[in-house]
Amino acid sequence: MASTVTTPSPTRPGYGQLLRTPGAWTFLLPGFFARQPFAMLTIGMVLLVQHTTGSYGTAGVVAATSGVSMALFAPQSGKLADRFGQGAVLLPGVLVHSASVVLLVVLALSDAPLWTLIAAAVPAGASVPQVGPMVRSRWAAKLDGTPLMTTAAAFESVTDEFTFVIGPVLTTALCTGVHPAAGLIAEATLTLIGGLIFASQRRTAPRPSRLTADGGLKQASALSVPGVRVLIVALLGIGAVFGGMQVSLTAFAEEIGQPGINGMLYGVFAAGNMLAGVACGAIAWKRSPHQRLLAAYVLLALACSALWAVHSAPLLGGLGLLVGLCIAPTMITGYTMVESLVPATARTEAFTWLTGAVALGQAAAVTVSGQLADRFGASAGFLVPLGGTTLALVTVGLLRKRLVPRPASLVVASGVRHRVPVTVD
């Protein structure tokens, strides 16, 4: 496939044009419901286990186990989806996930030992359906090489952030207003129904690579692309913000005697992500993607630097909004760069590496923030987002040249060469 150069157009494709893409709504609506686990699972586990054990540290360990499991298995799920089709991976995945979450709920409410909760959290995390990456792959299959691809990346990030507005608020409301386990039960139900409907939409799914690869030769892993490895580190830092904010905001609300405002504070933070995501999709950027990524990370690290020093709920909400506004440009740019760095036959895997990186960063942050909140108070937990973003910023700054696609670059996949489309900003 010849390399493609995209030149700036006088009129940027908008969301309306994107949503008129034939067949888009058949996977967007069920995909929205099926991607809820990423927004509801961690906070649901934290609230349930903290309720049954009284410890944020213990809750963080269980939630972190799930996140690490997801981070390890998500790329394999993406690779299998690229090779055998999305439906073949989704159908068993949503069944295992729903059953594992129900088992975890039963064990937690039965005051089962910690090791049993950890054992149930492993399959619950490993089987989280990678619907977000699969939706992105469907967009890429339909829009490959067109200006709408950047708009699609922004739209998907907005959708992700919208789930982070709805998911934590809904989970917190269910756990505090109905039953401590209600959030996880709702998450499992949405996953099962949405996942099965999404998997049934086969017309919009990318063709499995085993049907298109010449001679049935094995495809190269997306992880072999240096730029993908840098983006993984970048998204680890984003995960550290999500995990650190979830636990620390929960601990802060408890600390000031207003546990009910936890969902509101996190919702404001997530709303900042969503608003910035909408703006990113509407802007005709002149800077190159790697420059935008670095600039966004500098702003994010600066915004996170003051979280630990704030002790007022209104001020913390305002600062959380600012942090959220800085996250969306980073995530959108990272996901957009996959199109120019990775061949089409490995994009689902690449997207799942990034999603898995967010989950891993979130898991690590939940664990560390939980321990810090237990020992030193909620303010100490907010040091985790600062640490995660700082480390990621240094890495991206030092290795930013790896994020620049080489013109007509070749990716060798077991003897088969794939030319990667190069988008010129």
Image: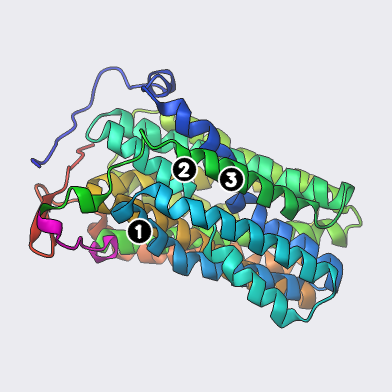
For the N terminus, the image quarter is top left
Secondary structure beneath dot 3 equals: helix
Crowd class of label 2 (few under 14; some 14 to 19; many from 20; radius 10 Å): many
Residue closest to the eye, 101 or 245: 101
* Residues at discs 3 and 1 in contact (Cβ within 8 Å): no
Real-space CA distance between mark 3 and mark 2, rounded to the nearest whole angstrom: 31 Å
Q: Position of residue 352 (x, y in %)?
A: 41, 56
Give the mark, 1 or 2, whose residue is nearer the N terminus: 1
Tell me the kind of residue under disc 3: Gly
Crowd class of label 3 (few under 14; some 14 to 19; many from 20; radius 10 Å): many
Considering only vertical position in the picture, is 335 above or below 56?
Answer: above
Residue closest to the eye, 33 or 423: 33
- Residue of label 1: 80
Considering only vertical position in the picture, is 353 above or below 204?
Answer: below
For the C terminus, the image quarter is top left
Check residue 324 in the rendering and tell me which mark sits there, or answer none.
3
Residue closest to the eye, 107 or 350: 107
Secondary structure beneath dot 2 equals: helix
The label nearer to you, 3 versus 2, is 2
Q: Position of residue 103 (x, y in %)?
A: 71, 66
Please give left or right for residue 355 compared with residue 60 in the image. left
Residue closest to the eye, 223 or 314: 223
- Residue of label 2: 199
Tell me the kind of residue under disc 2: Ala
